[in-house]
């Protein structure tokens, strides 16, 4: 699935006011792998990011790996997603806003899964400090995000 196809799926979820389920294969450029992911796109995805799960056997679960036990990926902080939607909607039409968000989703999911696949290949057992990521828990993540917004 391409960014354009994902964009169409996001737009369809809004238009039909129904949850859209889809699967896509993500290419992992750093680790030279790929991953199958499933998305649940809700009609109000502007408030909360689409749910992305990956059941590849090499995906590690736990807070440090940014993956819930259900294999749901924590690929963006909810407030960050909502702020991106709000900000981009001010300057772009609906199609280009959705295209931008499709690219953001794919970029973030790719980054996260690339780290997991690299960890599997290199037998890394802990998230490395040089891999940027938000802290765990809503309070700490919000504080980190707020600090980032102040410096940008």
Image (spheres, helix red, strand yellow):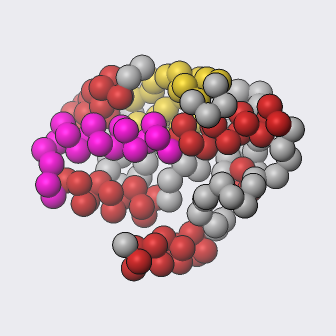
In this picture, which residue range is highlighted in magenta? Answer: 90-108
Q: Is residue 147 left or right of residue 94?
A: right
Query: Within the magenta stretch, is there residue 3?
Result: no
- Classify 115 as above or below 121: below
- Of residues 149 and 81, the one drawn nearer to the viewer in this rendering: 149
At x 14% / y 54%, what residue is drawn?
Answer: 91
The total of numbered circles placed on residues is: 0
Quarter in which the C terminus is drawn: bottom left
Q: Position of residue 79 (x, y in %)?
A: 42, 63
- Of residues 73 and 2, the one drawn nearer to the viewer in this rendering: 2
Q: Is residue 88 left or right of residue 64?
A: left
Q: Quadrant of residue 56?
A: top right
Magenta residues, dominant SS class? helix
Query: Within the magenta stretch, is there residue 92?
Result: yes
Q: Is residue 109 left or right of residue 137?
A: left
Q: Is residue 58 left or right of residue 100?
A: right
Q: Position of residue 52 (x, y in %)?
A: 53, 38
Q: Quadrant of residue 102?
A: top left
- Classify 152 as above or below 80: below
Q: Position of residue 1 (x, y in %)?
A: 42, 20
Q: Position of residue 46 (x, y in %)?
A: 32, 50
Does residue 131 appear anywhere in the picture? yes
At x 60% / y 74%, what residue is drawn?
Answer: 140
- Of residues 149 and 140, the one drawn nearer to the viewer in this rendering: 149
At x 72% / y 61%, what residue is drawn?
Answer: 129
Does residue 42 appear anywhere in the picture? no
At x 58% / y 75%, what residue is drawn?
Answer: 139
């Amino acid at each position: 699935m391409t960014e354009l196809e994902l964009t169409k799926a996001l737009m369809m979820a809004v238009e039909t006011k129904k949850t859209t389920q889809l699967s896509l294969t993500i290419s992992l450029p750093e680790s030279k792998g790929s991953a199958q992911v499933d998305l649940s796109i809700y009609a109000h995805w502007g408030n909360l990011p689409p749910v992305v799960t990956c059941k590849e056997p090499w995906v590690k679960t736990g807070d440090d790996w940014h993956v819930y036990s259900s294999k749901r990926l924590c690929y963006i902080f909810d407030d960050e997603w909502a702020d991106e939607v709000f900000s981009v909607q001010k300057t772009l039409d609906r199609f280009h806003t959705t295209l931008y968000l499709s690219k953001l989703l794919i970029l973030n999911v790719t980054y996260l899964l690339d780290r997991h696949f690299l960890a599997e290949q290199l037998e890394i057992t802990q998230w490395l400090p040089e891999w940027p990521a938000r802290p765990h828990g809503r309070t700490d993540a919000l504080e980190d995000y707020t600090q980032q917004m102040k410096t940008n």
